[in-house]
Amino acid sequence: MTEGNSNPFKNEDIITDEENNKTEEQAAETDTKQEVKEENSDNKLQEEYDKLNQQYIRLAADFENFRKRQAQEKEALIKYGTETALTNLLEVLDNFERGEKTLENTEDIEKVKESFNLIHKQVFDSLSKMGLEEIKAIGEEFDPKFHEAVMQTPTDDHPEHTVISELQKGYKLGDKVLRPTMVNVATKG
């Protein structure tokens, strides 16, 4: 055996201090890069959180403003809706006063009836402009949504459950019944 071959380690297996330092530097560099990536990732998450939080705060403020604006609009609708109704009815009130002055010296019943009918029509027209509708009853089939049966009359002249007379008119506003029509309903004779 020669002295060169007496070394039990091969040259390839020996790690020098220089190589060991390089490996440690690379590991430290990798750790640093990993920490920078994690820090960047944390920064991005924080930025995203801050952005979403700001959006949430703006959205909550917008919703609160919307809610307040809706309340104000509702209040204005009620206030000015009443104003419109009263303005329309002032014309009717004026006509009542004119009719009253005219009728003071009138003994003609036909003029009184004509004035009364004219004012009645004007009142109904004013209310119709605001959406008031009369509920049809006579000859219609009894409907508890629109009619209130206060009488029943046994008869063979009309089909059963048909309204044969109207005791008090009913009215609705759109789909809402303000007052049902009081009716007399036919039953089997």
Image (cartoon, rainbow, N blue to C red):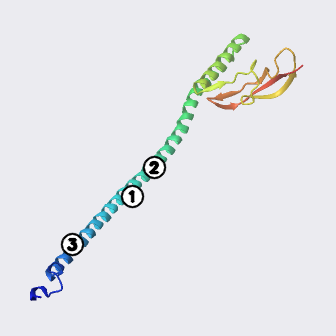
Mark 1 and mark 2: span between their CA atoms?
A: 15 Å
Checking the image for residue 29, the label placed there is 3
N-terminal-most mark, 3 or 2: 3
N-terminal-most mark, 3 or 1: 3
Image coordinates for residue 37, horizontal then vertical, percent: 27, 65
Label 2: which residue? 63
- Comparing 148 with 123, the one in front is 148
Residue at left 20%, top 73%? 26
Residue at left 80%, top 28%? 149
Secondary element type, mark 2: helix
Tell me the kind of residue under disc 1. Answer: Asn
In the picture, which quadrant includes the N terminus?
bottom left
Tell me the kind of residue under disc 2. Answer: Phe
Mark 3 and mark 2: span between their CA atoms?
A: 50 Å
Image coordinates for residue 46, horizontal then vertical, percent: 34, 63
Q: Is residue 96 left or right of residue 61?
A: right
Residue at left 68%, top 16%? 117
Secondary element type, mark 1: helix
- Comparing 188 with 175, the one in front is 188
* For discs 1 and 2, the disc positioned in front in the rendered view: 1
* For discs 3 and 2, the disc positioned in front in the rendered view: 3
Label 1: which residue? 53
